[in-house]
Amino acid sequence: MDPIRRRRRPALSCSLCRQRKIRCDRETPCGNCVKSDKAVCDYGSNNPPPSLPIVTQREHEQNSAQADRETRRPTPTPTTSSSRSGIDTPLSTQSGASPAYSSSSTIFGPAPATSANAATSAKATLAGLSDAFYVHYEQEQETASETPSQHIPRCVTHKTRLFGQSHWVSPSIILFRDLLETLEGGNIASAFANIQRCKSLSKLIKARRAPPWPTMPTRDLPSKDLADVLVDHYLQTMETIYRTLHIPTFKKAYDALWLPGAEPELPFVVQVKLVCAIGATAYDDHFSLRTTAIRWIHEAMTWNSCPKDYKPRLTVLGLQNHILLLVAQSIVGVGRDMVYAETGALVRTAMHMGLHRDPSRLQPPIPLRAAEMRRRLWNTIIELVLHSALDSGGPVLLSVDDFDTAPPANYNDIDLDLECPPPGPPPPLTTPTQSAVPVAFRQSFPQRLAIAKFLNGLPPSTPNGPYAAALALDGALQTAYRALSSTLRSHLPCLSILYIDVLFRRYFLALHVPFLEASLAPASVHSSKFLYSRNTALDSALRVWSITSVPPSSSTTHAQTHPRNEKQNQQNENSLLTTRILNNTSSRFLRAGTIQAIFVVAAELRSQILASRDSLVPISSMYPSFVIRQDLWDVIRQAENWSLDCIKAGETNVKGFLFVCLIRTWLEGMLLVPRGSDGDGETVRRLVVAAEEAARTCLGILEGMVGDAASGGGGGDGGVMEGGDGDVGGFVGGMEGLDFENVTMSDFLFGFEESETVSWA
């Protein structure tokens, strides 16, 4: 019996793309032929099929409705844009939404083969591909007197999560999709295999670091010498930003822990461990106490989640522990993506205790010292809510109408000590105190809250469109920033001031990044309209990078080679602690803003390279600085080293370093490789080599972490040797059975199997 012959699948790509084995967008001419200066695409005997590399929400609905009608009646009827398929209901324009916008979605995933099954394939792409990203756009309503409207990216959905405009993933996906499409034309099997091994080792390392759950809290503390250092590091760093403790009261209770026969209460022991866990991030450059800090955080999470002890936690001490727990999770990286959800529980607990009402409005009368502590805690809570929403891209479920608590007064902690006489009127904010910087920062809370709601909430109802609203918010924030600068001008530079400056720049950055794609488009009617956003985003990105990229080792070397008096040595130590917190190699508190800044700089650099191709000055490897800003190149090169330092400091997610290496190689290829078919092939080859080298580098570091754990050494991570068990071979082995032939770049570069989105470095 003759074997059944299978019908050969018709070729859908043009002859050039089939020959080069790269993805074809099936246009006439296709994008690759345009890049190769080939005006005509040859599809052979097949007509170029209409494809859907970018499918919008309206097209899904129209195609679905049309297909349904054709199956019921022989004569199809026209469809309207008001029909809804229910695929993307939360992001669609409904009756209660603003009429000034229309909603659409862009899907990054495999395109359907033919137009006949367009509706079915589109739904399968939405429902079946876990690694696809969906970029949802908002469009200003067109008028006859205006130029054609510009789509503005509103949010990105991936798997079960939705990221608003303030999340770092929005510019990375939107601005660098060409990079992913270019790389998919190469053979990335070797790089993918090493990335899979890195992911397996990462799981092993994290399993060994994490203690078993639940981790019951104990009264065991580190040695007093180590605890003193960690507590001091916390008080000099994060306590100056988020005022949580009354320092004299905390120190008295802390000193009592070490007295002979002391039996401290368990909630206070949990508080001390959380303080030590936060201080451990500034202990050294490589976070050698990572595993111990993770265990302390797990103990606090167990204590905070115990259901039978809920009412005893409704105290100032319980609220302080909850705040410290969220700060520790954010800065150490334990369940960091759940901090946004946990801040909701925190703010509701505080409201349950009445902290959202000013103490002057409550009965019985509250003493001044207790009232000021309530105001401090509420101020810290609303700042954490706003910061977590900015990082996660989630809506801020808080309004200025939800509370009437006044900002805390500008007192030092000693002024509120019970053993001291009642304090007089607080000094002005121009007088440096322990609370001056957070109190001054509170004055800009309404402006920052409005920006977060604009970026991550539902589409606003603005008569002049989103860009006019963004410019109005930008002006209000600029005014608040100038007022804050004038208030704090007499203060010496310190961690809290630098941190606030970074946060302000992050709001400017997040506000203008959604318009960056339109401003960078070459020969676009909208590029000049959004030029202010382009300049503001770039300036803010460079400012964020300049503050958060100073390596801590440079401060250590300077302090060792320049011996000074005791006061200057204290200043050097404070500077070292500041750089360790802001640098983000060990700490994760500001890492999302640093990553977003890198992408904005890379996008600007790419735009300059594309624009310089049409200039009179030719691009060459000898004179690139004539047309390209050298400071932007320096940022990209430094970002590669920074992301590698994060891995050396114990970070297990290697995708950030991989993507930065690819961006650098891609930009260098655009600058140095000539245009044309051969040049495009050389760029793909460079990208494949860069991916393989980056994967090998990361694999070697992770293998070293596991090896140090097996031998009992620290290996710069310090936490791999404790907790958990597992067999390295069991994780890494068995790779031969995997299919690497049909893998795409997005499968492993953006295949977030775990919910660690912001730890991408």
Image (spheres, rainbow, N blue to C red):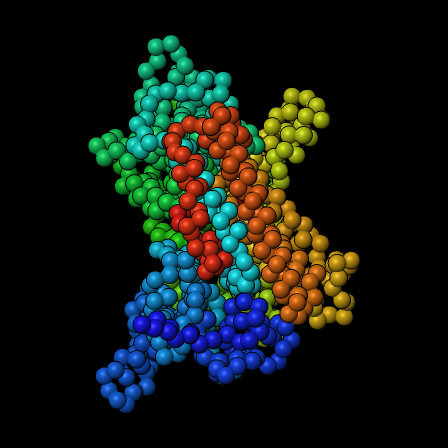
Residue 239 is left or right of residue 96, and the answer is right
x then y, percent, for residue 620: 75, 62
Closest to the observer, 346 or 55: 55
x then y, percent, for residue 523: 62, 74
Q: Is residue 260 above or below residue 230?
A: above
Closest to the observer, 137 or 614: 614
x then y, percent, for residue 741: 47, 58
Where does the N terminus fall, quadrant-wise?
A: bottom left
Q: Is residue 55 above or below residue 340?
A: below
Residue 305 is left or right of residue 276, and the answer is left
Q: Is residue 348 above or below residue 564?
A: below
Task: Looking at this view, name the residue that lies furthest to the front.
Answer: 1
Residue 631 appears anywhere in the view: yes
Q: Residue at x 34, y 43 (%)?
A: 342
Q: Quadrant of residue 72?
A: bottom left
Residue 206 is left or right of residue 509, and the answer is left
Closest to the observer, 747 or 362: 747
x then y, percent, for residue 409: 45, 37
